[in-house]
Image: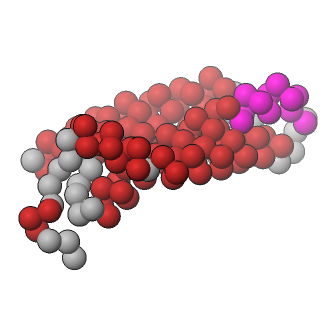
């Protein structure tokens, strides 16, 4: 599909270039997260959350959505050029944003501390997984 001479792992500086190119994907994820996180809180069968809680959910959702979408965008943009993105850069973003989002969607009334903790654990696990994959690939 891609010419073999173009295949190769990108450097960290190239990852920054791909991150800039993936910014529209990241911003789309940010807006989606800012909308979906408060909606998850509002759709629970319990009490209606206060405006402050909805604002906190929107901020956390925007951050998690941006991180998740930006990580996926880096992989997509590098793939479009026939390059292989460093998974040690993209995997923590995807795992961290994904873990925070999954925690919020599974337990819609999850406190902020739980969602952030899940995201932090996802970043750590993603970092180790990305480093291991990069080490095995090279």
Residue 78 seen anywhere in this rendered image of the structure: yes
Q: Residue at x 88, y 28 (%)?
A: 50
Q: Is residue 25 magenta?
A: no
Work out whether residue 61 or residue 126 is closer to the camera in this orientation and state it: 61
Work out whether residue 119 or residue 18 is closer to the camera in this orientation and state it: 18
Identity of the residue furthest to the bottom in this view = 1
Measured from the top left, where is residue 19 in percent x and y? Answer: 39, 44
Q: Residue at x 83, y 43 (%)?
A: 42
Image side of residue 55 versus residue 120, left or right? right
Work out whether residue 108 or residue 25 is closer to the camera in this orientation and state it: 25
Residue 104 seen anywhere in this rendered image of the structure: no
Q: How many marks?
A: 0
Determine which quarter of the picture holds residue 123.
top left
Measured from the top left, where is residue 89 in percent x and y? Answer: 31, 39
Image side of residue 68 versus residue 2, left or right? right
- What segment is highlighted magenta in the picture? 48-58
Determine which quarter of the picture holds residue 102.
top right
Compared to 65, does 113 lie above or below? above
Color style of the picture: secondary structure
**What's the magenta bit mostly, secondary-structure-wise?**
helix
Q: Residue at x 67, y 32 (%)?
A: 59
Measured from the top left, where is residue 136 in percent x and y? Answer: 13, 47
Determine which quarter of the picture holds residue 112.
top right
Q: Residue at x 17, y 50 (%)?
A: 9
Compared to 120, does 43 lie above or below? below
Q: Give the quadrant of the N terminus.
A: bottom left
Measured from the top left, where is residue 90 in percent x and y? Answer: 35, 43
Work out whether residue 40 or residue 82 is closer to the camera in this orientation and state it: 82
Image side of residue 79 versus residue 111, left or right? left
Compared to 94, does 75 lie above or below? below
């Amino acid at each position: 599909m891609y010419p073999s001479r173009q295949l190769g792992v990108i450097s960290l500086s190239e990852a920054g270039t791909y991150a800039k190119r993936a910014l529209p994907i990241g911003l789309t994820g940010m807006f989606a997260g800012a909308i979906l996180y408060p909606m998850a809180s509002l759709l629970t069968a319990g009490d209606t959350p206060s405006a402050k809680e909805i604002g906190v959910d929107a901020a956390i959702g925007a951050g998690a959505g941006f991180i998740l979408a930006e990580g996926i965008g880096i992989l997509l943009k590098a793939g479009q050029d026939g390059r292989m993105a460093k998974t040690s850069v993209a995997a923590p973003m995807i795992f961290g944003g994904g873990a925070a989002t999954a925690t919020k969607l599974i337990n819609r009334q999850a406190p902020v501390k739980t969602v952030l903790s899940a995201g932090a654990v996802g970043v750590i696990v993603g970092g180790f997984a990305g480093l291991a994959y990069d080490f095995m690939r090279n």
